[in-house]
Image (spheres, grey):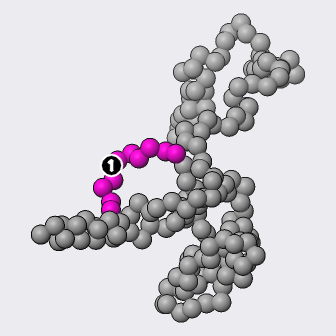
Amino acid sequence: MKTRFLIAALAFLAAAPALVTGVVAADGPPASGPAYQGPKVSSGPHPITLDVQAESTTREIVDDVKRVRNYADQPPLIPHAIRDYQIDLNINKCLTCHDRRNVEGSQAPMVSVTHFQDRDGQTLGTVSARRYFCTQCHVPQTDAKPIVGNSFRDFDAVLGATAGKEGGH
């Protein structure tokens, strides 16, 4: 008795999607067998299968001009294109120019000495594993408008405003 009920329940569950969606048609072609050819799909490229590049909402700034930082301890922005740079466990394209051994020939700024320290503060001969993936902190410059306002003033601007007030008395 239990076996019959279980078989009936499984058969109903297997047929339920077809019954709900109305896929089963009494007069249509067979849903399986040698005469069944599958769903009709137009030949040629279909919009759902095309790989289309998304339109950029911002423009990268690649003029190699160093920008002022927006807040204290901000990692420097990347002033050049990095679209096809490989940065993975095997290769870090950034270090081709920015590693301490390569800066003389490339004229690129050297990676900060903090990048050569492990989490215990020990200085290493190469870039620390925790600082190896540059784009975790450093990002390319774009012409994107700020999402929120920013009233950051660098240290020199704050000192200049203070010095001006003191000099006026």
Extreme residue toward the left, this view? 169
Extreme residue toward the top, this view? 27
Hey, what amino acid is under mark 1?
Gly
Q: Is residue 36 left or right of residue 68?
A: right
The residue shown at (57%, 75%) is 131
Extreme residue toward the front, this view? 168
On screen, 60 above or below 118? above
The one of 109 and 122 positioned closer to us in this rendering = 109
Q: Quadrant of residue 101?
A: bottom right
Res. 8 visible in picture: no
Name the magenta segment's main secondary structure.
loop
- Expressed as whole percent of the image width and height from the top left, the position of residue 1 reads 53, 38
The residue shown at (69%, 77%) is 103
Q: Is residue 88 left or right of residue 133?
A: right
On screen, 85 above or below 94? above
Q: Quadrant of residue 125?
A: bottom right
Q: Which residues are magenta?
A: 143-153
- Expressed as whole percent of the image width and height from the top left, the position of residue 102 reads 73, 78
The residue shown at (38%, 64%) is 71
Local SS, label 1: loop
On screen, 24 above or below 158? above
Report which residue position mark 1 lands on.
149
Q: Is residue 2 left or right of residue 124?
A: left
